[in-house]
Amino acid sequence: MFAEQADGRFASTTPAEYLRSDVPGSIRAWAMFIGRPHTWSAWAYLPESIRTDEPAFPKLHGTSSWEYRASRPEESAIFEAAMTGLSAGAAEAIVRSYDFSGIEAFADVGGGQGELLAAVSATNPDLRGILFDQPHVVAGAKALLERSGVADRGEVVGGSFFEAVPEGADAYLFKSVDHNWDDGAATEILRK
């Protein structure tokens, strides 16, 4: 990531550029999230998780990662920034590879702060978007949608996908959602 120069100073290498916040494809927010002590410390329990098929995080912290972050707004903000960054990295490929024509309204379920919804809406001017995630997550979404110029065509809804998802969409997008849950919970999310 860094190389020592002849004069003893260190300089960034090409891969380190992606740790900057001002470059396309930045993974800065993701690196900050995975570098948090509560995140990386759970990796010490990987052998136990493999043996027991139980997640490590609750064993270490006494609560799920979701509950942990919910009680620590600063950690939740770091996580949300990481998820937004990952969505920004995937958005171009998604809008390039999927034909959204014929869809009047689409819902991004578990869509975080709306990065992907904004990208899809920006490239499909006739599309109406519905952003759905936990209330504390979507609380800052309006600003992102306004900066992207799509706030007038987007609805922001807070709730739990274990209870219900917004009705009225022609298509529902789930990105980076089901992998966080065991098979039973993932099936329940898809049923809703």
Image (cartoon, grey):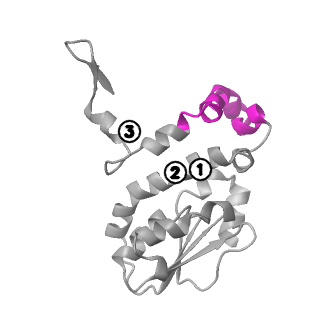
Mark 2 Cα within 10 Å, few/some/many (few <14, many 20+)?
some
Distance from Cα at disc 3 to Cα at disc 2: 13 Å
Identify the residue position indicated by label 3 in the image: 19
Query: Which quadrant is home to the N terminus?
Result: top left
Task: State if disc 2 and disc 1 touch (CB < 8 Å).
Answer: yes
Q: Position of residue 167 (x, y in %)?
A: 64, 83
Magenta stretch secondary structure, dominant: helix
Q: Is residue 8 left or right of residue 181?
A: left
Span of residues in magenta: 34-61
Q: Secondary structure at mark 2?
A: helix
Mark 3 Cα within 10 Å, few/some/many (few <14, many 20+)?
some
Up-down relation of residue 172 to residue 82 (above or below):
below
Q: Amino acid at mark 1?
A: Ala
Q: Amino acid at mark 3?
A: Leu
Identify the residue position indicated by label 2 in the image: 81
Say which of 115 and 72 sits in front.
72
Identify the residue position indicated by label 1 in the image: 77
